[in-house]
Image: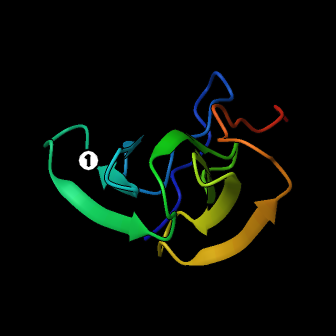
Amino acid sequence: MKCWARNSCGTYFGVAPISFISGSDDNTIRLWNAATGAHLRTIEGHTSLVTSVTFSPDGQTIASGSNDETIRLWNAATGAHIRTLEGHTDGVSSVTFSPR
């Protein structure tokens, strides 16, 4: 998959044709095509419900927060796990990347 280019406003989009992501009480992250509504991929790895998901500004990485007290980073193109960040003593309610 190729990453979409930056648009005239400087906004990055996710990995084509992925348009959005969702986190769920079933401990998964799902990637969707907004144009068709098609489910593209399910990412598994959290051991409790996923409370927050976001794309990095360049669209190449997904960050997810969970009630399992971790933040996980994923490759947006493949769904591969990159890293787990630990240290919270309760569920993670929000994740975001700093803007460029």
User: Is 67 on the left or on the right of 97, as rendered?
Assistant: left
Out of 29 and 57, give the one closest to the viewer: 29
Q: How many marks?
A: 1
Q: Is residue 29 above or below residue 2?
A: above
Q: Quick one: quadrant of the N terminus?
A: bottom left
Q: Residues within 10 Å of mark 1 (few under 14, many from 20)?
A: some
Q: Quadrant of residue 25?
A: top left
Q: Secondary structure at mark 1?
A: loop
Q: Residue at x 54, y 78 (%)?
A: 80
Residue drawn at 81 percent across, 47 percent down: 88
Task: Please provide percent x and percent y for residue 10.
Answer: 69, 29
In the figure, is residue 91 to the left or right of 86?
Answer: left
* Residue 70 pos. (x, y %): 69, 56
Question: Where residue 74 sits in the image (x, y, percent)?
Answer: 60, 66
User: Residue at point 73% right, 72% down?
Assistant: 83
Q: Amino acid at mark 1?
A: Asn
Q: Residue at x 30, y 65 (%)?
A: 41
Front position in the image: 100 or 22:
22
Q: Is residue 47 visible?
A: yes
Q: Which residue is mark 1?
A: 33
Image spot of residue 19 (x, y percent)? 37, 43
